Amino acid sequence: MKTAKKTRLLSPVLILSAFACIAWCGSAAYAQGESALPFLLFSSSADANGMGDIAGSVPSLTATAPLANPGQLGLFSLENVFTGAMYPEKTRWIPAFYPTNMKYTATALNLGYNFEDLVPLPIPVSIGVGYSRVALNYGTFVFTSPSNPAGWQSVDPEETSTQFTLGLGLDYLVHLGVGVSFKSIESRLGMISGESGVQEGTAKVSAMDFGLIAMAPVADIVSTLADTKLELLPRVEPLLDLSFGYVHGNHGGEITYVDAAQADPLPRKATLGAGLEIGFAAKIRESRWRIATFMLSHEAEDILVIRQSDGTFSYQDGLGDIKFMENVIQGRMNPKATVRKGWQFQVAEILFVRGGHVDAPGREYETDGFGVSINGIFKFLEFAKPEVSGGWIGFVGEHFDIQYSTGKYEGLTSLFAGTTFKQLNLVIKKLPF
């Protein structure tokens, strides 16, 4: 158990940081989950942001998905070799809080390789490596005085986290991805006054995330075990996928700006979720084309930090206060866990419409979003005219995809209302040689 004392910041940045933490973690849960660096809890994938911030429990090709669950990288590597994502414009964080100009952004690159492409294996095994970076910039602050109203110093406080991720994928009826991320975190908040005088308010700390995600293509499993082909119509098959995700995140040391006696805990967390996707699909060569599907997912998250009234803190083990049946299956909130509920309807892997709801102690908001993908266009052309599969249409459809997604937070009483995420994602599905 550690004791956390307080320091005095010679700028309004600490106030903004504390405000961001209280707003995100929820005032009712702040005593239970109070921690430093709340930006580590933000969802960085625009498709997930539109779907109730759910990114760790349903499969995703978005390059920033391993930020939510490192196991996504292992799952991705089973059938893909590259993905890269960026924000075309930075996201203004908490736009309803007008005095701030906080901006959030994320970038990511991932590589994957399936060893089955190299040598025959009893079961497909793949590996993935990834790099990502997220940043929350608090804007520029200028220090003024009566004798120097124009300002005598300015600071540009920012908090960043850089991740290197390793993933392993396995495929034997059920697709399984496991992964670990090594995080290098830096916080620059301004000038701090301590026992040694005024110092730069900079702190660095390392942490790790561990995650796993499993996806069971139930219709395919039944077809394989029964040794029969399931078809609803010629070339059209039923689709029923179940997914499950677990994450233990931000496991590391405490954050210290001046001296170790003033350390605060990282927002160590547990995340548990499940998803269901149903619809219709068609096989095009060896890949599956989702003609029309509906996805529903529930995810629960608990900050494992416990704060005492005297400033000391400790960590919970395992899942913390998450209840699998109550929070994940039924989607009901308890007083100490955040519950996310999200849905997605997609047509032909071209158009995606998403929505969701986040319910946490002290905060509640709705989400919505949409996405478009060019890959579905080429798959549709291949399905409609199989003879084009050998040409450039088939080549592009088999190997490349460009996706654009948006996500937005809504809610008349939510500080997050109007926060909008926009993201571009490039995917190379197989080696084109």
Image (cartoon, grey):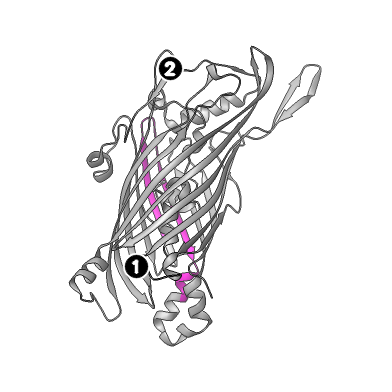
Q: Main secondary structure of the magenta part?
A: strand
Is residue 344 positioned above or below 279 on the image? Answer: above
Task: Give the magenta-colored segment's residue range.
Answer: 353-378
Hey, which quadrant is residue 109 in on the image? bottom right
Residue 45 position, x and y percent, is 48, 50
Front-most of 202 and 191? 202
Residue 353 as seen in the image, left or right of residue 422 = left
Question: Which quarter shows the N terminus?
Answer: top left
Residue shown at 45% from the left, 58% from the top = 127
Is residue 354 positioned above or below 163 on the image? Answer: below
Of the residues shown, which amino acid type is indicated by label 2?
Thr
Hey, which quadrant is residue 220 in on the image? bottom left
Is residue 167 positioned above or below 162 on the image? Answer: below
Of the residues shown, which amino acid type is indicated by label 1?
Ala
Hey, which quadrant is residue 321 in on the image? top left
Find disc 2 in the rendering and name its residue.
312
Callout 2 secondary element: strand
Question: Which quarter shows the C terminus?
Answer: bottom right
Mark nearer the N terminus (2 vs 1): 1
**Label 2: how many residues lie within 10 Å, few (<14), some (14-19) or many (20+)?**
some
Q: Which mark is residue 292?
A: 1
Residue shown at 27% from the left, 40% from the top = 327
Residue 310 position, x and y percent, is 42, 12
**Label 1: how many residues lie within 10 Å, few (<14), some (14-19) or many (20+)?**
some
Front-most of 41 and 173? 173
Callout 1 secondary element: strand
Residue 328 position, x and y percent, is 28, 43
